[in-house]
Amino acid sequence: MTPRIDFPGSDRGDHAWSVRAADEEDAPAIARFHVSCWTDAYRGVVPDEVLGRVDVEARTARWCRRLVGGRRTTLLAELVGTANRVVGFASVGPSHDAPEPGLPELELASLYVARDLWGSGLADVLVARAVGETPAHLWVYDANVRARAFYEKHGFVDDGVAKVDDETSLLERRYVRR
């Protein structure tokens, strides 16, 4: 069994959550949650036609590859006392970018939290557990102002590098914490 660490809920009195390392058996649950987050959090950021193509089956296959491949470590947050409902995850690993002088090797590749737990501290816990104080970088949609502010609160800075995401055709900005 994967070790689990329980955390209290937020100051608002929310349920407690647990955080543990995900394994390949978690791929379907992560995929369902990931699709739900995309359609919820990215409405108005990602074009509706792109959101309409986000598919649980394809995401499950993608998460199976990620969880078995060993390139990334994925932490899974579940709500305690609710049949372990997935409420967040963070995924980290070696950079997908070509090596650059001064660019930290560690990439925070994914961070998602259920909307009803935004502001609860869960995202803070996931970042702390996933990258701690280690230098790291990430990519975030330019239009995702809320996420950009969150990452800035955690010491990440827009380093001026941008690219167009192949899947969405949206501009992404690279944020780095050294």
Image (cartoon, rainbow, N blue to C red):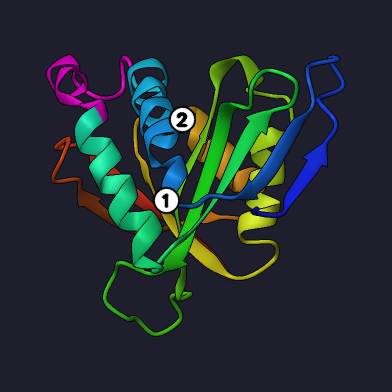
Query: How far across and how far down the image is residue 143, in percent?
Result: 35, 30
Residue at image point 86% right, 15% down: 13
The residue nearer to you, when weighing 79 against 146, is 79
Highlighted magenta segment, given as a residue range? 43-56
Disc 2 from disc 1: Cα separation: 32 Å
Residue at image point 39% right, 31% down: 34
In the displayed structure, 112 sits above or below 92; it is: above
Q: Which mark is residue 145?
A: 2
Image depth: mark 2 or mark 1 in front: 1
- Location of residue 44 by image quarter: top left
Q: Secondary structure at mark 1?
A: helix
Q: Which mark is residue 163?
A: none
Query: How far across and how far down the image is residue 153, in percent?
Result: 66, 44
Who comes first in sequence, dot 2 or dot 1?
A: 1
Query: How far across and how far down the image is residue 6, in percent?
Result: 80, 40
Tally of numbered discs:
2
What's the amino acid at mark 1? Glu
The residue nearer to you, when weighing 86 against 144, is 86
Q: Is residue 175 visible?
A: no
Residue at image point 13% right, 46% down: 166
Q: Is residue 74 visible?
A: yes
What's the amino acid at mark 2? Val
- Please name the residue that numbered disc 1 is placed on: 24
Q: Neighbour class for label 2 at 10 Å: few (<14), some, many (≥20)?
A: few
Q: Neighbour class for label 1 at 10 Å: few (<14), some, many (≥20)?
A: some
Q: Quadrant of the C terminus?
A: bottom right
Query: How far across and how far down the image is residue 39, in percent?
Result: 33, 18
Q: Secondary structure at mark 2?
A: helix
